[in-house]
Image: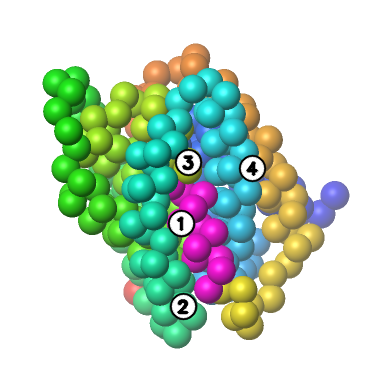
Amino acid sequence: MSAALILALIAGAVVGLALGALGGGGSVLAVPALIYLLGFTPAAATTASLLIVTATSATALYAHARAGHVRWRAGAAFAAAGILPAALAGAAAAHLPQALLTAAFATVAALAATRMLRPAARTDTTGRPAHSGKAAGTGAGLGALTGLLGVGGGFLAVPALVTVLAFEMQVAVGTSLLVITVNSLASLATRSGAAVTLDWAVVGPFTGAAILGAWDGKRLAAKVSGRRLQQVFAILLLAVAAFMLGDALT
């Protein structure tokens, strides 16, 4: 077994664990893993990440749906707002300098880690209606982020679903996977004709390990505090962001 294959399997398992347990965040590790561990260019890494995230999120979505943790109507509306921004940003990403994409990704990863380290906001249990305009704006922003940087946006979707739509945490995690899957598919559609060559001998095993990891992540979420999982992941993500930003600026 080659070193590249071993690295792909390990990285894929970590990505899947994060997506299955937290409803997001795994994709912000997929891109740096593909670039720095497996030698992908930023453009190829973001495209491969979208493929991996789509397959893994769909698998994790099925697991959460079986447990009744997906609000299909609200999630579909939230995701619909991001379809066009995801497609437009995905088309634009092919024309941007690779160093700029790397720096932007590192910045987003650092912001995501900072958000994860903050104390969790209390869920609104008053039953008041959600602010549809704010929800649509948040959905559009997540779509643009997905298309541009190849991340699913779950690390932003989960807190948005909790604070804007007043979802319980488990339901927010499950519903965010629907949003991630839709946004990733929309962005992939615009990249299908791009001249990006992917190493399927790496992408395939990476995706397979991520899918298996997503099932383990779902089980892990039922045993370990979600807050503790977020803290551990955020510290790892901060280290990755710092490394990527330093690389982009040198």
Discs 3, 4 touching: Cβ within 8 Å: no
Label 4, label 1: how many angstroms apart (C-alpha)? 18 Å
Question: Quick one: label 1 or label 2, which is nearer the N terminus?
Answer: 2
Q: Tag 3, which secondary structure?
A: helix
Q: To which quarter of the image does residue 199 belong? A: bottom right
Q: Secondary structure at mark 2?
A: helix
- Disc 3 or disc 4, which is closer to the eye? 3
Mark 1 secondary-structure assignment: helix
Q: Amino acid at mark 2?
A: Ala
Task: Give the residue at mark 4.
Answer: 210
**For the residue marked with disc 1, what is the amino acid?**
Asn
Q: Earlier in the sequence, mark 4 or mark 2?
A: 2
Disc 2 target residue: 91
The crowding category of the residue bearing disc 3, from other C-alpha atoms within 10 Å (few below 14, some 14 to 19, many at least 20), is many
> Which residue is drawn at the image coordinates 39% and 55% (left, top)?
80
Label 3 belongs to which residue? 177
Residue sitting at the far right? 1
Please check the rendered image and state whether residue 184 is part of the magenta-colored stretch, yes or no: yes
62 to the left or right of 129: right
Question: Is there CB contact under 8 Å for labels 1 and 3?
Answer: no
Q: Is residue 82 left or right of residue 183?
A: left
Q: Badge 4 local density, few (<14 within 10 Å), some, or many (20+)?
A: many
Residue 73: x and y, percent? 40, 39
The residue at which mark 1 appears reads as 183
Give x and y (percent) for residue 197. 69, 76
Residue 215 place in picture, x, y as percent:
62, 29
Q: What's the CA distance linking mark 1 and mark 2? A: 13 Å
Tell me the crowding category of disc 2: few under 14, some 14 to 19, or many 20 or more residues within 10 angstroms, Cα based: many
What kind of residue is marked 3? Leu
Residue 194 falls in which quadrant of the image?
A: bottom right
